[in-house]
Amino acid sequence: MCGIVGYVGSSPAGTFLIDGLRRLEYRGYDSSGIAVISDNGVAVNRAVGRIDNLVDSLGSEPPQGGTGIGHTRWATHGPPTEANAHPHRGGNGEVTLVHNGVIENFQPLRDELIGKGYTFQSSTDSEVIAHLIAEALGQLEEDEAEPDNRYVAAVQQAISRLRGTYGLAVLFDDCPDMLIAARFGSPLVVGVGRGEHFVASDASPLAGHTDRIVYLADHQLAVLRAGSLTVLHRDSGKIRPDIQLLETETEQVTLDGFDHYMLKEIYEQPVAIRNAMRGRLDDQNATAIFGGLNLTPQQLRSVDRIILTGCGTSWHSALVGEYLLEEFARIPVEVEYASELRYRNPPIDPGTLVFGITQSGETADTLAALVETKRKGHRTLAINNVVGSSIAQAADGGVYLHAGPEIGVASTKAYTSQCCTLAMLALYFGRLRHLSYEAGQTYIKNLRLLPAAVEQSLSCDVQVRQIAEKYQSASTFLYLGRQYNFPTALEGALKLKEISYIHAEGYPAAEMKHGPIALVDTDTPSVFIVPRGTTYEKVIANMEEVKARGGPIIAVTCQANPAIDDLADDVIRVPAIPEYLQPIVSVVPLQLLAYHVALLRGCDVDKPRNLAKSVTVE
Amino acid sequence: MCGIVGYVGSSPAGTFLIDGLRRLEYRGYDSSGIAVISDNGVAVNRAVGRIDNLVDSLGSEPPQGGTGIGHTRWATHGPPTEANAHPHRGGNGEVTLVHNGVIENFQPLRDELIGKGYTFQSSTDSEVIAHLIAEALGQLEEDEAEPDNRYVAAVQQAISRLRGTYGLAVLFDDCPDMLIAARFGSPLVVGVGRGEHFVASDASPLAGHTDRIVYLADHQLAVLRAGSLTVLHRDSGKIRPDIQLLETETEQVTLDGFDHYMLKEIYEQPVAIRNAMRGRLDDQNATAIFGGLNLTPQQLRSVDRIILTGCGTSWHSALVGEYLLEEFARIPVEVEYASELRYRNPPIDPGTLVFGITQSGETADTLAALVETKRKGHRTLAINNVVGSSIAQAADGGVYLHAGPEIGVASTKAYTSQCCTLAMLALYFGRLRHLSYEAGQTYIKNLRLLPAAVEQSLSCDVQVRQIAEKYQSASTFLYLGRQYNFPTALEGALKLKEISYIHAEGYPAAEMKHGPIALVDTDTPSVFIVPRGTTYEKVIANMEEVKARGGPIIAVTCQANPAIDDLADDVIRVPAIPEYLQPIVSVVPLQLLAYHVALLRGCDVDKPRNLAKSVTVE
């Protein structure tokens, strides 16, 4: 799960590579590296840690040359050392490459290559590919008429032996004006410029350089030169590249005075939610409007089951969606981990609609699950934040969040925008079926309360910081809620886990007594999300159970209630809003709690250890 | 969530009460107490901790008297102190009672009673009931013709004000030969003896004393005297008690040389699984046989969706069941937390069959969820281990595990028996639909491999103990597996959490990189359940990701595999068995790991803090 960039042209490659890697840093930031080719051969620079470390290592004389590749890494095989950083070299250095993906059979291939005398410098799976290409190259005759053919054939022979996924960009020492890119399972985008070509693992590095792009498909390979682009398919040979217009706006994302992107994005939520709803609320028909579903009302009415799939935070918004769609559309909903759905082959009948939810639209597990269900003939829709993303292209239709770029690795505004979008979808599906005009009107009225309610919930920031100070040293947290508040418990726990490295876990509050309550002692805080609603008193009884065992209690609630004030050590109040929209409001103090605890513990809030913003490997 | 006993007769009440409380200790063991009434008034003894402490506090002269009540507590409101232990007294001591359940509106009632001058000795919700009865009693006239009427009316008036659940046994100071029991939501069983009557929260204390029992229903109240039993319903008044024959065998459960019941029950698993399968495998028709489903094959064929519900460990076996039923019966399955299902009102269509899974058959959440779905007309089946349990009575039909009594609070043999039973149900449903005769035969052949495979997996005990020594000080553990091995990861984590109080969490292995991997460092062990199967190499890639970040790895696998041997710090081998039955085998080392870690940390393995065996409150 890494970021790839490549350049061939007349400008200095290094400038584009470094700038592109910065834009891709969300994909991984364990280590990075670039290789630039010139008539003097290939110069490789690599560094552990952030791109800044790489820039420092380049010193005042960055490598010169018009062809190059770069990589920012999220370690899959081998620790984040300089030796494991990309680019990797194969043979005696005649092949240099960067790789995104996971090679599952790298171990037998490695053993075989070692047997043939190849020496490995790293413990990565990627280095195997470099040697395989060098091995193939050595056995191929030069083709004087079509000199590129030999390089293409070497890459094709090598990748034919791989099991797993790859996005590759390959340089050849003796061919300094060419770059080969190949894809299976890991996205690659080629940018078509004037006298230059680009390649990258997504379109973000291309913005500002060119708006003409070609999405490579699986089993496609591209030969890039300054003045030409050739695309080949494994089976059908040379094909005409499908040049599309890049719609991404070049938006410069800055901190705007905030200390961290995460904090900024938490505070952007009222605006993000407004943007998610903009133009989508139809007062006249008391429903929601979606432009890109590409399904007729009649097709949508025939849906008798919905599967929502995603990973991490998106899986939590899927759970909120389950409650919403089941309550308002009365359609049975199943929520599946994308990684499990993909391989599970569950029975799905023809009336099932599958939603893939992902902020980036590049999440490998979600993308693959969606493609797998689509392959079986099911209708698929994507909910994602990035226009033109891989999932947006793969699905039959979808909805964009319009939340704006999310930079912090821990998702905040994308989560609440996802929940808000699912709430609008529940209204839309409901109004195609049982939901009355009047109920639709009330629903819209309540949706319109959201931006102000979220805005108001931000005012707990100072209080939450004090609570964070109190509990910053805890090594374990429980988050508890029921019904609509259960996903909020999961999401609050995940935020804390991701950025403060404290083991926090969410549970349905009533499930606590079936095991997790064993963790409760005077050092283990429990965060109860108990705004109001149908199980309000039941959750208060669960608070009593924790209190009886001496556990500190933090409660997120709405109105004043003497029972909660009595039981909880700290009470955070958020505005009351109808139960089904409450998750969008109640999660805000939990985002802030995670932020402040992480900050107090000296953690890197925007780039927590071991994680990457967009998980583009399985 | 507590245990209740009561006695009226000519023998000394104390003897039955203490013995009964010991048998009910699985329901809670924070504190306990008894009250015995004689002509000298009521003598109350209470103690914090186990029943043994109560016995010690009684000294050499236990209270004399032929009428008494007893209680063993799992704290819901207020810490486990002597003041909060039951029995509680109301008014000026004229009412003494024990209570199981949760009173949700106890706070306003308490405020009201304090306003009237009542003094509270405890912070429990239960004491409110005692005062309410005393209050009502004070305002009722004596009825010379029917003196019992006044007591009955006082109890009825008091419980009419309660919101929540209760099982009650009440003594009156001035009526030493009578006991009143009342039930709503918390089970009560009356035992009919010769010149004596018993009451208890389940039938286990009655075994050996009488085999004639009456299950009280909600809104029923019983007046027990040595020579008479009167049962009244809130609405219809006096009713004829339905006396049933108690089927439970009196089985004396002993440690048989093991140090703990949990260890003994882990070792009993080969036998328990054999018992679960006994008489249920039909070679001739290549299917399974179930005697008590009470549904015709035609009814079962019309099932187009299954909901499996349970709590804690039973929820994990439900997940295994989901994979099994979806694969072999090709029926879409939804697994729901019982506590969530109960209040969620999900859309369920007429073809949906609901299974409630619980070891004890008394789990309040599961019972309530089953009753709620049955109320809406859905067919319900119970999978449980205790003949004649509440859920067995409530469901349309069901399957008994026949695992024998499970005493350790952390479920082991009941879990594997549940998985085995669900595997047989998947075969049965499959053979009613798509599964071929031949596939059914193979399935049966594989089921028969289970007892020996589980037996063989126990041989890792010594090795697991060494691993436990190595990691006993870790404060957090991750458990990771995919597909059929995902529930095993959840179950392994829950075992460790329950008895060692280490924060362990299970995840689908691929989901790790979407957040939990932030927890990985050199002090955080990851347990990978990676026996074989479809996602074998994917999980090995996940192991690489953990290894790259320095996390110690414990792998549970089958055959030797150099990649796993290379990556894992410790490799535990279990016998290979077809993928869909592997969970029953692979969980064994995880049970042993939890056991040894808990033991090394000095925890009470059979009675972990804060937990109770059977969770009989919501």
Image (tube, coloured by chain):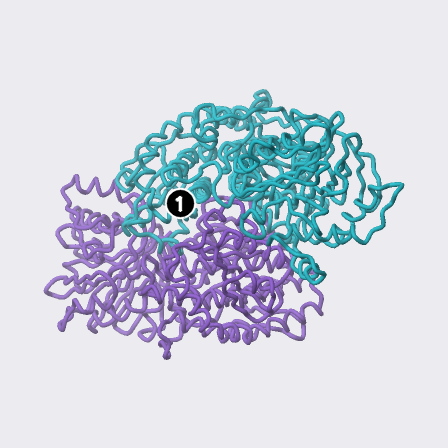
Chain colours: A purple, B cyan
Q: Residue at x 57, y 46 (%)?
A: B334
Residue A238, position as x, y percentages in the image: 32, 57
Amino acid type shown at disc 1: Leu
- B158 to the left or right of A213: right
Measured along the vertical axis of the image, is residue B556 above or below residue B83?
A: above
Subunit under mark 1: B
- Residue closer to the observer: B164 or B153: B153
Q: Residues within 10 Å of mark 1 (few under 14, many from 20)?
A: many
Measured along the vertical axis of the image, is residue B445 above or below residue A142?
A: above
- B126 to the left or right of A500: right
- Residue most extreme to the bottom: A257
Residue A292, position as x, y percentages in the image: 53, 67
- Residue closer to the observer: B194 or A59: B194
Measured along the vertical axis of the image, is residue B443 above or below residue B534?
A: above
Q: Residue at x 59, y 46 (%)?
A: B85
- Residue most extreme to the front: B40
- Residue closer to the observer: A117 or B377: B377
